[in-house]
Image (cartoon, rainbow, N blue to C red):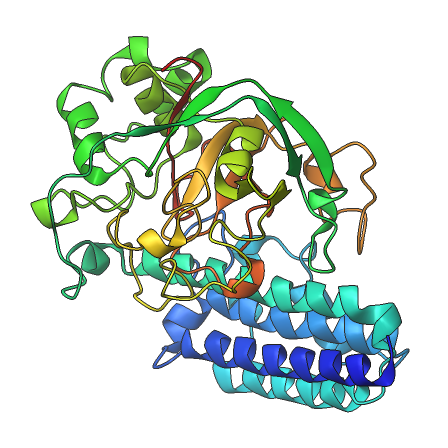
Amino acid sequence: MNQTSTQSCRDKIYQDFQQCRLKTMTLFADIDEASFRGQSHPEFSPVGWHLGHIGMTEGYWILEQLAGQPQLYPEYRQLFAADGLPKCDRGLLVPSFPEVCDILSSIRTKVFTYLEAAPLDEQERLWRFIIQHESMHNETIAFVLQIQNLLESRDKIPGQITDGHPVAAEMLEIPAGEFDMGSNSIDAMDNERPGHRVYLDTYWIDRYPVTCGQYRQFIADGGYQKESWWSPDGWKWLQENPVVQPLYWHNESEWKNHPVCGVSWYEADAYARYVGKRLPTEAEWEKAASWDAAAGRSRTYPWGEEMPSGKQCNCDGIVGQTTPVNAASAGQSAYGMEDALGNVWEWTGSWFDRYEGFAWYPYRGYSQAYFDNQHRVIKGASWATRPWVMRASLRNWYHPGVRQILAGFRCASSQP
């Protein structure tokens, strides 16, 4: 980088770090100590742990690894490490909210002092990783708080969103051909790299995610009682987890055009079988969302290169809940796929695995530990996702039985 571009990069990182931290802290407005330290689900840490982890991770990578400074708050290193204490033991040891805020403030002050002279031509990728790391934990905090307030949130309907006519289950034809999958951008996580060409035969994919209105029919037709619509593993999961509707379910007619949210991969797969379709592969989803055949290139976002905002999609916690799947036509892809980014994450039929040429970054366990044929890829983003981790190439992954994440799905087919 020349001096001008380096300063521009420095200014952008400073602004992004500031904006993201402000958004982080809004999640804790009026929080009480019980909610700060309480564990709402055995698979997820208390929100107070996530806040401390955000700060300690930033200090470790920026101050210790890049700046070579001594370790800060060594007494909290094990507590706030991702591989430290069991999740069930973290809440009792998390300091109070004001104390954690002081830790984050102290670390951030030193980080910004170092940023003034940091050699960003060598370090920009790691700084971008840290902003995305905080953004990802923002989303975890958001849905953990939603789990805590599940009963209340079920009755919360965003009044400014109109109902409209039921959304039809329209499908888009995606012609056969190659497209550019993945990304080599400075923001790209290790599992998104390297960008590569993929050929797909012609297929069809839903214009919109499956709505509550559509999923309601699956429930009414005995979807959770009929084994024939479930895979063997899915039926086994259902017997061990006897649910009868999605976790974040709204049965009221006002929600009929909102995407179904809070389903496991097994539930999504069962619904797809019920309607005679299947879940799209990761490549099918990404091509429909990003490929601009006329230009011969992939777009960063379905609509182009403009960073996500409320104009193109429901993201960044602006609304605080899902919105109708057809509420943001400005966000459609070149093929006409809508609501791909924001609102709800979308399950795919693919297992999470490395791309050929994969190289781990910034540490071996970030992605590589999950290439175990036990995690399904989810694509897109949710209403709680921050703009810094929204792009068509981004890959997320979870065990197929997880329902707490803000996930829905859309269907695909190899036949019209």
Quadrant of the image containing the N terminus: bottom right
Residue 353, compared with residue 34, is above or below; it is above
Can the viewer see residue 65? no
Residue shown at 24% from the left, 13% from the top = 226
- Image quadrant where residue 295 sits: top right
> Picture coordinates of residue 200 (x, y %)?
59, 22
Percent x, y of residue 266: 40, 26
Residue found at the far right of this picture:
68
Q: With respect to residue 201, does 347 lie above or below?
A: below
**Residue 283: x percent and y percent?**
58, 31
Q: Choose between 188 and 200: the one closer to the eye.
A: 200
Location of residue 74 with respect to 302 vertically, above or below: below
Query: In the orientation shown, which residue stands out farthest toward the front?
Result: 294
Compared across the picture, whether 262 is left or right of 309 comes to: left
Quadrant of image for the C terminus: top left
- Between residue 388 and residue 224, name the one nearer to us: 388
Residue at image x 88%, y 78%?
A: 119
